[in-house]
Image (cartoon, rainbow, N blue to C red):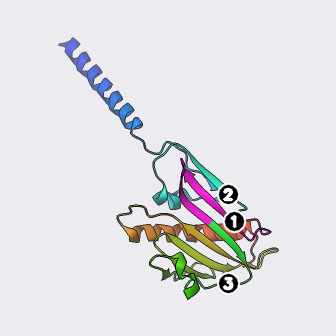
Amino acid sequence: MMHTRKTRALTCALTAALALSLAACDGGREYTVLSEACGIPLDEAKLDPFLVDGKEMRAADQDFLDPSEHSGFCSIIVDSEPVAVLRVDIVDKVYDPMDPSEAFRFTNRKKMDDLPFEGLGALGDNQSMVSTDCKGPEVDALITYVSADPGDAEDIDRHRSALRALTLDLVPKVKKKLRCTV
């Protein structure tokens, strides 16, 4: 009887270990979420809705936040797929993202009301655009774009809400990095 209990306990333990090892082989997030990308701190909770299963997370940038280049981007990548892209254009004034000339950037464009900072914003299904004054030592104004592919998002409203939250988190950090005074 004692031998049977030990056998059952060992069988249960081995079955549980096998199930866990098979689950580990089934994918999931095997990477550590970056605490910053391209010199900008990241809020994991704001980035989480866009993260996918994979092994490695990294950031790649091209002239990001270099005032002499006037435009640059930062891609947050899982394995080889960009999950979010942040682009900043250094401009001469605040531009209205709701202007008809900006419509090509969006699917289902809506004005972003109640920004927690001075500026103008618009939100689409896969991209946001926020234009703000800066009045920094090298930058008069800037436009920040944040894009994330909704993929097969079952709830596009939830995706848009997450994109808005990520944008509102990143814009003040970009302005701080560019030493904006407003």
Above or below, 112 relative to 151: below
SS at badge 1: strand
Decide whether the magenta segment is chiefly helix, strand or loop.
strand
Spatial separation of the CA atoms under disc 1 and disc 2: 7 Å
Spatial separation of the CA atoms under disc 3 and disc 2: 24 Å
Does residue 82 show up magenta in the picture?
yes
Q: Residues within 10 Å of mark 1 (few under 14, many from 20)?
A: some
The amino acid on which the numbered mark 2 sits, given as a three-letter code, is Asp
Mark 1 — residue? 72
Would residue 159 be found to the left or right of residue 103 on screen? left
Q: Which residues are magenta?
A: 66-86
Residue at 53%, 82% in the rendered image: 103
Mark sitting earlier along the chain (3/2): 2
Does residue 102 show up magenta in the picture?
no
Name the disc covering residue 94, or none: 3
Residue at far left of view: 1
Q: Is there any visible trace of residue 38 in the rendered image?
A: no
Mark 2 — residue? 61
Residue 40, position as x, y percentages in the image: 66, 60
The amino acid on which the numbered mark 3 sits, given as a three-letter code, is Val
